[in-house]
Image (cartoon, rainbow, N blue to C red):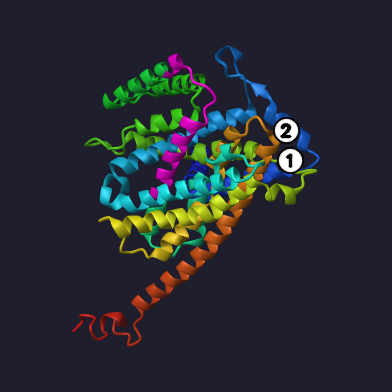
Amino acid sequence: LERTGAVAAPVLRALREETVGGVLLLVAAVVAMVLANSAWGDWYADLSATVVGPAALKLDLSLGAWAADGLLAVFFFIAGLELKHEFVLGSLASRRKAAVPVAAALGGMIVPALLFAAVNLSSEAGAPVGWGIPMATDIAFALAVLAVVGRQLPVALRAFLLTLAVVDDLGAITVIAIFYSDYFEFAPFVAAVALLAFYAWLQHKRVRSSFIYVPLALSIWTLVHASGVHATVAGVALGLLTRVRADPGEAESPAERLQHRIQPLSAGLCVPLFAFFAAGVDLRGTDLAATFTSPLAIGIIIGLVLGKPIGVFGGAWLTARFTRASLSSSLAWRDVGTIGFIAGIGFTVSLLIAELAFSDSVEQLGTAKVSVLAASVLAAMLASIALVSRSRYYAALADEEERDDDNDGIPDVYQRPGSGSG
């Protein structure tokens, strides 16, 4: 057992890194696309459509639906924990510090949705119901790209991106709950709210038993699903109700403890499996030229690739220009533009909203998924180019600050006239 634990520990640590989670997500998506367009395509489609679960509880769902409704609830639980941490202890706890990245997030949601709507409302072949698709940012992919390409960038840039992504997740959940629920059942919804209140009370009373929390969480998820509200909302609600401030003498808060334990499950299993079932679009016999020239595809690609950076930069600049809020002194406006390109990586939540928006149209769903994948890849490429440029700038700046040509142990920048070195 000790040997097994010693082997598992490095794996668990790796799965807590955004880079590893992003890579697994990408691998799962690529495998799905290859399978769906190979001789195994029919097997893949049948696997995704395989129904399992008790019909009495209305949980006789396909494996694809289980991945979207069940596994992603774990992902959104982690997102809920991060949201709660940011609201209580992080960058969102200070209104002044949070104002600029929050405005950037809102701009990054509104502008893509408006661009998508403009394209699709102006065409008879448009699909305006998909307006929520380009609003989302994939936090795992975004932070993975930043971690791989932007190692020289200031910590403030990562904090800005994290705050933006957290607010973006909250916006996506709100959009899903309000606009992409098929029906609404009052009784199970009230029961779910009551159990959520009980969960909050248990947190307040410092109850720690998993024998209580696991059945309770499963019951809440089941009731939310039965109510017609998308079941992932249960995950983010539980995360927001979890205590994030550690008590005196407590090594870590319940939120930290749960995130430490569940993050590997989310990054290593739940999100990649969702990507595996969601990204496999059968393109055999598909006219890609016609697909990418459809209003639906154009709206998604323009929304993510152009709308996101325009909205992020515009929201941040307008807030800094017309309010008392200001951009962090360690960031430049070019950095905000770079963050805008990163935010255009919409993958996970965009695919989820696509499935909800076009569940009754296989053709439109396929177009939406292919467009999300293409737009996310394009946004990632543009973000990587921008990140490399900014990394070189900050690396050159760091070299200049450390330069000591006269080898006297004092950087030359502090010995120049007007530097204050005397």
Q: Is residue 336 left or right of residue 353?
A: left
Dot label at residue 282: 1
Q: Nearer the viewer, residue 182 or 329?
A: 182
Q: Residue at x 31, y 60 (%)?
A: 321
Q: Which residue is mark 2?
A: 45
Mark 2 neighbour density, 10 Å: few (under 14) some (14–19) many (20 or more)? some
Q: Quadrant of residue 193?
A: top left
Side (left or right) of 162 relative to 279: left
- Residue 107 is at least partly visible in this image: yes
* Prevailing SS of the magenta stretch: helix
Residue type highlighted by circle 2:
Ala
Cα separation, mark 1 vs mark 2, equals 9 Å
Q: Is residue 169 magenta?
A: yes
Q: Quadrant of residue 166?
A: top left
Q: Position of residue 154 (x, y in %)?
A: 38, 62
Q: Nearer the viewer, residue 299 or 313?
A: 299
The magenta segment is: 163-189
Describe the element under mark 1 as helix, strand or loop: loop
Describe residue 278's horizontal placement relative to residue 263 as left or right.
right
Q: Is residue 357 above or below residue 225?
A: below
- Which residue is pictured at 42% across the width and 50% down the height? 107
Quadrant that contains the C terminus:
bottom left
Q: Amino acid at mark 1?
A: Asp
